[in-house]
Image (cartoon, grey):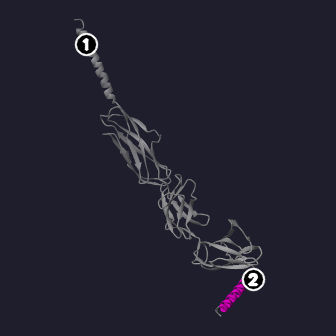
Amino acid sequence: MKSSRNYVQSVLFLFTFLFFYGQTVKAGNGITLYTPYTNISVPPGESIDYSIEVNNYGSQLKDVEINLTGIPDGWDHTLKAGGYTINRIAVLPGEKKTLSLTINVPLKVDKGKYNIKLIGKNYDILPLVINVSEQGTFKTEFSSDQINMEGHAKSNFNFSTKLKNHTGEKQVYSLMASPPRGWNVAFKPNGRQATAVEIAPNKTTNVTVEIKPSPLVKSGSYKIPIKAANKYSTAELELEVVIKGSYDMELTTPSGLLSSSITSGREKQIELLVRNIGSSELRNVTFSSTKPKDWEVTIEPDTIPQIKAGGSEKVQATIKAADKSVPGDYLPKITAKTPEASSTASIRVLVKTPLLWGWLGIFIILGTLGAIYYLFTKYGRR
């Protein structure tokens, strides 16, 4: 009785198996597509790798065309088997083949559910669901709290900027600038000069932008566009430098000759010329000097209230040599300066012996010769 019951159960199981197997074969026409992970949640920017089995339950060779439908615009995908990109695959009866399906979820994507279908044409359909867990973006932000600076032509302008990677992946950005001709722009991410910077996902890096104007720059306002870019994203920022003007001067003589001569203990007047060779007005030009010991140097006037750009003013320098100056070359220096600029003139002065001492020497020599002659004539015959 027990064996009869087991026999009946076995027969029922066999019929049940054959029924469902037949339905499966009928549904897939002998081909089924299978993967264990049909519903996956991922963040933006993720790559999903599926291993797809193509099973042939039929009795004949099947050449199956494989298509992927429902894939959103901008999503990349590849379908490979045996290391090759394919769109068809042949499967022998009772065998299976494995496909590799890779779907790249972009960084700029809306949060939500995406339904995709892998289709074995005329055979089977494999539904795939991808849940994007958060709102995605692909954006880079270049910003600064201060985008305008003002100064003169010899100033260095250091802008503090921030570069933020709003994407879900690490990014490497090239740093570029388009300054006026003759200007120099240097980028210093985290204090070190570089032409590129690597930033982690959703992180910010401080970038100092050092701008040096051309030495020949004129007064005015100048725009300096900068940008951080890679093949995925570009962020731009426009900085502005306002040049008030350059400050520079030259101290010389009207003839350009910076040499003279003087007698020891005497004084000499030398006319000096202060030229404003910058592009801004010079104010309150004062003078100082470096001179040999016991020498005196005075300037009249000792202050010039202002010199317009491209203009010049004359002053009178009086140099007095020390009474006991040894004959030779001396080099007193006179400096004209303002808080913004300065110039120094080194004047080579040749000190000569006073004419009185020359005549006195001659008289001493003549007197000595006369004394010798007198003694010779008086006592020479004895």
- Which residue is outermost to the bottom? 1
Residue at left offset 30%, top offset 22%:
363
Residue 32 occupies which quadrant of the picture?
Answer: bottom right
Image: 276 above or below 42: above
- x%, y% of residue 199? 53, 65
Residue at screen point 33% across, 30% down: 354
Q: What amino acid is at disc 1?
A: Tyr
Q: Nearer the viewer, residue 62 or 116?
A: 62
Disc 1/disc 2 C-alpha distance (Å): 158 Å
Residue occupied by mark 1:
374
Name the N-terminal-most of marks 1 and 2.
2
In the image, residue 13 lies in the stretch drawn in magenta? yes
Which secondary structure class fits the magenta region best?
Answer: helix
Across and down, in percent, residue 138 comes to 59, 71
Q: Quadrant of residue 224?
A: bottom right
Asked if disc 1 and disc 2 are in contact, CB closer than 8 Å, the reply is no
Give the magenta-colored segment's residue range: 3-22
Give SS at disc 1.
helix
| Mark 1 Cα shell of 10 Å, populated few (<14), some (14-19), many (≥20) | few
In the shown orientation, is residue 87 left or right of residue 197?
A: right
Residue on which the image places disc 2: 26
Query: What is the residue that sits farthest to the right in this orientation?
Result: 60
Give the number of the disc on residue 128. Answer: none
Quick one: quadrant of the C terminus?
A: top left
Q: Residue at x 32, y 32 (%)?
A: 326
